[in-house]
Image (spheres, rainbow, N blue to C red):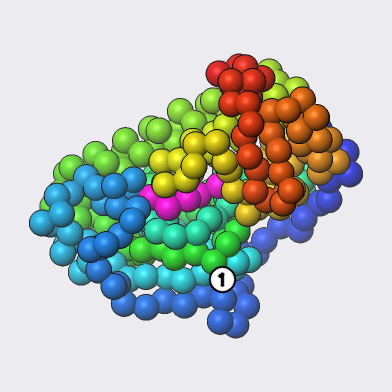
């Protein structure tokens, strides 16, 4: 892992500390019209049974920068992201930060056998989530076995993505890692209604660096190299046009 000039971060106490007004919990507004339902575990239930989910759920609004859960904190709730983006963060033993992944609409948070959260989960952008108390979700899974099957299927897909990411980090150079990241993010956003040859990157370059195991400087050089090679173009560093998708796929070994 390329760690030059990466800052260290003090471990968290495990308690959520939100800025005033950064987190707001409210009654659930209903599943009808949800744009991410087809991507979420909720799709495991027929629409006629969505009332059971609505009865158990509430909604949580997170301002950008707010913390949803702390690594090591008690796992009392599970969540489905319906709007925005969050990041999963873990602190390594030497104090360095690892961004384990980015969460988008339809992603489920909290499917685990552990009593504590394994990552700190932070809002990259203003975000909205459906919240289910853990006991209520367990009751729903007992009542609707297909819901638990849907959760397991999403967990398996996440595991496959993690394995692919580990292979990318182990075998690829910086530009190849970045190419793979851009391709993956573009595909995930396409499934959520985005353009096939465009990717939005609301996260910081530090987030990308800590996700890919690189320094910020190396990430910046890799963006410059891909742009120089004609694979990408951008005026705004958070809005990237994928000019040559086949070249990006080749670079990422896809």
Question: Mainly helix, strand or loop, the magenta region?
Answer: loop
Instruction: Residue 36: give x, y in percent of width and height.
Output: 35, 53
Q: Is residue 137 left or right of residue 1?
A: left
Which image quadrant for residue 151?
top left
Residue wearing tag 1: 63
Whether residue 89 appears in this view of the structure is no
Name the residue nearer the viewer: 187 or 70: 187
Picture residue at 77% right of the left edge, 55% below the top: 9
Whether residue 113 appears in this view of the structure is yes
On whether residue 237 falls in the magenta region, the answer is no
Which image quadrant for residue 139?
bottom left
User: Is 5 above or below relative to 138?
Assistant: above
Q: What's drawn in magenta, residue-wise?
A: 102-106
Name the residue nearer the viewer: 135 or 183: 183
Instruction: Residue 167: give x, y in percent of width and height.
Output: 60, 22
Instruction: Residue 156: give x, y in percent of width and height.
Output: 38, 32
Instruction: Residue 174: give x, y in percent of width and height.
Output: 76, 28
| Quarter of the figure that contains the N terminus | top right
User: Is 229 above or below relative to 143?
Assistant: above
Q: Secondary structure at mark 1?
A: loop
On whether residue 103 falls in the magenta region, the answer is yes
Picture residue at 60% right of the left edge, 66% below the top: 64
User: Is 123 above or below relative to 247?
Assistant: below
């Amino acid at each position: 892992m390329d760690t030059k000039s990466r800052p260290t971060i003090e471990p968290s106490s495990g308690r959520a500390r939100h800025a005033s007004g950064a987190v707001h919990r409210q009654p659930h507004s209903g599943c009808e019209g949800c744009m991410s339902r087809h991507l979420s575990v909720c799709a495991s239930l027929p629409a006629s049974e969505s009332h059971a989910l609505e009865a158990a759920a509430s909604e949580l609004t997170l301002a950008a920068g707010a913390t949803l859960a702390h690594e090591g904190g008690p796992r009392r709730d599970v969540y489905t992201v319906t709007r925005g983006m969050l990041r999963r963060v873990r602190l390594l033993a030497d104090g360095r930060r690892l961004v384990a992944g980015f969460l988008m609409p339809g992603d489920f948070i909290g499917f685990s056998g552990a009593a504590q959260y394994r990552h700190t989960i932070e809002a990259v952008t203003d975000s909205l989530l459906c919240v289910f108390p853990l006991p209520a979700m367990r009751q729903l899974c007992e009542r609707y076995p297909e819901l638990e099957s849907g959760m397991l299927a999403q967990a398996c897909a996440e595991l496959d993505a993690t394995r692919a990411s580990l292979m990318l980090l182990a075998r690829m150079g910086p530009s190849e890692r970045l190419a793979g990241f851009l391709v993956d993010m573009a595909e995930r956003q396409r499934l959520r209604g985005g353009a096939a040859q465009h990717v939005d990157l609301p996260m910081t370059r530090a987030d990308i660096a800590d996700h890919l195991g690189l320094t910020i400087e190396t990430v910046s050089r890799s963006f410059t190299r891909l742009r120089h090679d004609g694979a990408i173009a951008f005026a705004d560093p958070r809005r990237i046009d994928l000019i040559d998708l086949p070249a990006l796929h080749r670079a990422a070994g896809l």
